[in-house]
């Protein structure tokens, strides 16, 4: 017989019933004076509940019952004396007051091990009140706005069944996290909301994002320098700017990115599909061992796109070259429709041409005024295998 946790469950439950362990002690924010009236700031009550849960030997549970809670920016700091569950049944609402905007987080967790965030609740970022401040395309005095939920140095943790709506900046930001799973996350913000990345990952290892729906104004998922062993599977993206590795090689980005798998996912009406972007000129680094597999696209503007001349704002120096080496990248079973003629664009650096790029079973159709679907390759070494539409340029 295969032995699993399910066989142990009755034993665990009866032990828990008898000794009230390992079920963690519960710290209800209402007992700390939280008022779900949409007006009162609940930062103090939440922090006190967090501190008690965090200090509780054997673990604690912060419990946020149904209701709508105003919450200013807050940091929940560890290390804690045991695992902490942060259960959001209600809706947390960010401030719409501009004097509270210019800080890097709304809700942050730092230095926590074995954190679980869940409960089916909502994070309402009220981004509409601030988007014009961080739109650098239209506002030269743009300033960064708070990320809805930041995880910094959070390890062996997970977040599931949370909805984030209208963040002011990115919805979720993971920095220096390790062994962190995200499942059943729903993210939404309008297609034209600036800088509202869905999930932004940097300097993190062993991250898994699964079975989630992301509709937003910027990248659905972006994976930045220093990230390793990242798996994305069963994610629906759109609208948004697609799945992005990079931008790499910028001023604070000299670490490598390696071991990325993006699989069994769908992109609908996005600006990009599967993209690797690096600055030019750039610091040297490496992006390698990247697999995009089993991807469906519907009306995606740049379905397969390696861009080593990434420059979103002028002035751009078109003669500068990137020093980020891109190596061992496979696009496999990528199918659907492109909304532009060049469904495959692989534009690598003259200094460090891409190596080991594989296109396997690609089927991307284009029906539009620009004629037949096409591919374009620059400074790239690679191979194609199996049927290719557009016909390969490798
Ligand atoms: C994340 O998921 C993987 C694979 O499903 C599992 O092995 C790992 O223990 C999970 N990590 C956490 C912290 O839940
Ligand atoms: C693919 O993702 C969907 C969710 O979008 C999930 O229901 C399905 O089980 C996944 N299939 C595989 C083979 O992982
Ligand atoms: C990045 O990878 C290159 C090539 O494998 C290696 O020489 C370099 O040390 C790595 N950089 C970092 C910061 O790990
Ligand atoms: C290329 O990357 C894949 C993962 O995408 C890895 O399994 C494989 O070992 C790598 N190949 C080389 C030659 O490094």
Image (cartoon, rainbow, N blue to C red):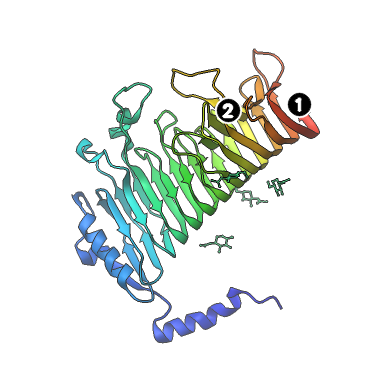
The residue shown at (45%, 43%) is 187
Relative to 292, is 216 on the left or the right?
A: left
Report if the CB atoms under discs 2 and 1 are less than 8 Å apart: no
Count up the numbered dots. 2
The residue shown at (31%, 22%) is 140
Residue 126 in the image: x percent, y percent? 31, 39
**In the picture, which quadrant includes the N terminus?**
bottom right
Which class describes the residues within 10 Å of circle 1: few (<14), some (14-19), or many (20+)? some
Can residue 222 be seen from the camera position used here?
Answer: yes
Residue 78 in the image: x percent, y percent? 34, 63
Q: CA distance from mark 2 to mark 1?
A: 19 Å
Give the residue number, with chain letter if any, for mark 2.
308
245 or 90, nearer to the observer: 245
Query: In which of the image's four quarters is ligand 3 placed?
Result: top right
310 or 389, nearer to the observer: 310
Image height of 124 relative to 216, above or below: below
Give the residue number, with chain letter if any, for mark 1.
392
The residue shown at (28%, 42%) is 103
Image height of 292 relative to 392, above or below: below
Image height of 291 relative to 135, above or below: below
Q: Nearer the viewer, mark 2 or mark 1?
A: 2
SS for dot 1: loop
């Amino acid at each position: 017989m295969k032995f699993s946790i399910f066989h142990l469950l009755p034993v665990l439950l009866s032990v828990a019933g008898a000794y009230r362990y390992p079920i963690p002690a519960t710290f209800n924010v209402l007992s700390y004076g939280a008022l779900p009236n949409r007006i009162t700031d609940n930062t103090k009550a939440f922090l006190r509940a967090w501190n008690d849960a965090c200090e509780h030997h054997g673990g604690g549970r912060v419990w946020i019952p149904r209701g709508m809670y105003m919450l200013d920016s807050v940091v929940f700091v560890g290390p804690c004396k045991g695992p902490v569950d942060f259960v959001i049944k209600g809706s947390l609402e960010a401030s719409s007051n501009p004097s509270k905007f210019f800080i890097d987080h709304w809700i942050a967790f730092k230095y926590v091990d074995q954190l679980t965030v869940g409960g089916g609740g909502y994070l309402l970022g009220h981004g509409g009140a601030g988007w014009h401040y961080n739109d650098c395309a239209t506002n030269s005095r743009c300033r960064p706005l708070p990320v809805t939920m930041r995880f910094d140095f959070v390890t062996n943790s997970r977040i599931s069944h949370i909805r984030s709506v209208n963040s002011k900046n990115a919805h979720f930001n993971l920095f220096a996290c390790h062994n962190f799973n995200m499942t059943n996350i729903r993210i939404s913000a309008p297609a034209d909301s600036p800088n509202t990345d869905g999930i932004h990952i940097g300097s993190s290892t062993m991250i898994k994002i699964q079975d989630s729906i992301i509709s937003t104004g910027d990248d659905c998922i972006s994976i930045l320098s220093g990230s390793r062993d990242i798996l994305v599977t069963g994610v629906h993206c759109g609208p948004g700017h697609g799945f992005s590795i990079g931008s790499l090689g910028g001023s604070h980005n000299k670490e490598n990115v390696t071991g990325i798998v993006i699989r069994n996912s769908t992109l609908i009406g996005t600006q990009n599909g599967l993209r690797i972007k690096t600055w030019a000129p750039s610091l040297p680094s490496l992006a390698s061992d990247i697999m995009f597999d089993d991807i469906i696209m519907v009306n995606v503007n740049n379905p397969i796109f390696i861009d080593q001349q990434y420059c979103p704002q002028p002035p751009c120096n078109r003669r500068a070259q990137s020093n980020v080496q891109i190596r061992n990248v496979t696009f496999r079973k990528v199918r659907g429709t492109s909304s532009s003629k060049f469904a495959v664009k692989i534009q690598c650096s003259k200094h460090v041409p891409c190596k080991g790029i594989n296109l396997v079973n690609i089927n991307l159709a284009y029906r539009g005024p620009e004629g037949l679907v096409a591919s374009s390759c620059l400074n790239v070494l690679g191979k194609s295998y199996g049927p290719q539409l557009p016909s390969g340029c490798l």
